[in-house]
Image (cartoon, rainbow, N blue to C red):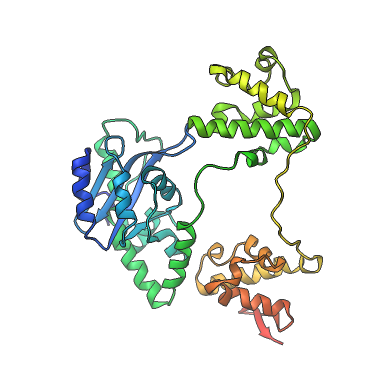
Amino acid sequence: MSSAGAGEHTLIEDDRAFAELLERLSDQDRYAIDTEFHRERTYFPRVALVQIADEHGVALVDALSVDLEPFGSILDGGAVAVMHAARQDLEVLERSTGTVPARMLDTQIAAGFLGYTSPSLSTLLERELNVRALKADRLTDWLQRPLKPAQLEYASGDVAHLLELHDVLWDRLVDRGRDQWVLDACEEIRTESRGPRDPDEAWRRIKELRHLRGAGLAVAQAVAAWREQRAIETDQTPRFVLSDLGVVSVASAAPSTIEELRSLRGVDGRSLRSGMGEDLLKVVAAAAGRRPQRAPAPPVPELPTELRPAVPLVSAWVSQRARDLELETSVLATRADLEDLLRGVPGARLTQGWRADLVGEPIRRLLAGEAALAFEIGQGLVLEDR
């Protein structure tokens, strides 16, 4: 068994060398890409390294020394970007280059259409290519310079075999007629909305606020929104601006002085520096006496009472359908997808494309009385015409 990190790689640490790499990539019809980043103390991911592989080899781009923005021309081009578990990497790329790949194939998603359940890259490399991935130090500081040889070796392994893995998976997908399904699923990820969260919705993520009512909840909503906006503006995690406990304490006590604010649990010196304490008191004062502001819920139809017993039954059938098709169940349909379909939500995922053919239309026929579910030993739940 070979090692995923074995092989040559080039470290790129200046804009001139990066421009030469981009010139090379402009002639490629595909490339593999991965990123290393940190966001433990920042609101936005801070990219440290970008790994790129094409037919010529692996290049490791030091994002602390190189301006990544020109890479946007490659991402916007016609070449396919091969990635693994791409969601966070897409956010990193959009943040650092202003765009995401115009064409993208995620090997984790692709593997889900071949029966894998959210597989790691190391799992796929071992099972599909007989390649053993190097073990990662999860505490590696990718922002520290110089990068150690072991870090570079591990980073190169993330892309060194990704194009070969793509070929193996893609051939099997084409043989099973699932290539377009994968492209559709990857497009869903590629076109997702990314970026800062809505500050007015920030309070919903703090479960300790659920018991508040009236003026207390109004203050909590205002403080949570202030915290989120401050985090965005200063590129800090919201909890570094003010802890969740601090939000709850401020909402419950509604302090009017710095001394009162300082005495609250969850409020420390970080929350009071550079005029932040005064700003926070202004937010509390402005929210005092208000009624809680709740964003209007989207117009989602209620699930009819008579259909509620159908949810677990249909879920069981979908799970079996996924096993029979050798698909990851969540790729085929989530519980939320099923409930959206039963509620009649416009544009529900199960009313479109291949999902409609595999499960959406059969469920519609079941609800319309045109089909019925029966249990047969050896086959499980069977959808039959009535």
Q: Look at 74% across and 81% down and name the residue there.
A: 369
Left-right relation of 134 to 224: left
Which of these two is toward me, 85 or 374? 85
Residue 370 shows in the view: yes
Instruction: Please tell me in which quadrant of the rendered image residue 378 appears.
Output: bottom right
Q: Is residue 240 above or below residue 25?
A: above
Specify the farthest residue to the front.
286
Q: Is residue 91 above or below residue 81?
A: above
Which of these two is toward me, 353 or 3? 353
Image quarter where the N terminus lies is: bottom left
Please state the horizontal and vertical placement of residue 249, each as a whole percent of the image: 70, 25
Instruction: Please tell me in which quadrant of the rendered image residue 336 appears.
Output: bottom right
Q: Look at 30% across and 48% down and name the residue there.
A: 71
Left-right relation of 82 to 41: left
Q: Is residue 384 above or below residue 219?
A: below
Left-right relation of 383 to 231: right
Please state the horizontal and vertical placement of residue 290, each as a whole percent of the image: 77, 32
Please state the horizontal and vertical placement of residue 49, each as a whole percent of the image: 32, 41
Left-right relation of 204 to 172: right
Q: Is residue 18 above or below residue 281?
A: below
Residue 133 shows in the view: no
Please state the horizontal and vertical placement of residue 272, each as a whole percent of the image: 58, 18
Specify the farthest residue to the top.
259
Image quarter where the C terminus lies is: bottom right
